[in-house]
Image (spheres, rainbow, N blue to C red):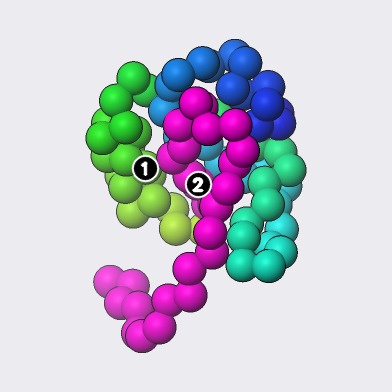
Amino acid sequence: MKWLEARNIYPDKWLLFEAIEAYSREGKRIIEELSVINVFEDGREALKEYAEKHKKDKSREMYVYYTKNKELTIQERNWIGVRNHG
């Protein structure tokens, strides 16, 4: 589904979603298609579930975003350092 569809279906909600089709441009992640994993009233609960799911499977591209935002704007972050996978 597109971000506009998600906003219409879930107004004023926090969404935990997975990017199905996405690409990078000018330091931003552009999400063409997404799949809603869960819907929340409280952003803290959404972030908690995100953390649990991300810990189990780091390969999934998941985000938490509030549907009151008209545009889906995700800044890319460059991580510097060593990651411990253990």
Q: Position of residue 40 (x, y in %)?
A: 37, 23
**Closer to the N terminus: mark 1 or mark 2?**
1
What residue did someone put label 2 on?
62
The one nearer the camera, 41 or 86, is 41
Q: Is residue 61 magenta?
A: yes
In which quadrant is the N terminus drawn?
A: top right
- Of residue 59 and residue 34, the one placed in the foreground of this image is 34
> Residue 50 has which mark?
1
36 above or below 48? above
The front one of 72 and 9 is 72
Query: Where 38 sits versus 55, above or below?
Result: above
Which residue is found at the position 59% from the left and 22% from the top?
7
Residue at 45% across / 31% down in the picture?
Answer: 66
Label 2 SS: strand
The answer to whether residue 62 is left or right of residue 50 is: right
Identify whether 10 is placed above or below 82: above
Amino acid marked by disc 2: Met
**Residue 46, quarter of picture:** top left
Q: Secondary structure at mark 1?
A: helix
In magenta, the rendered stretch is: 60-86
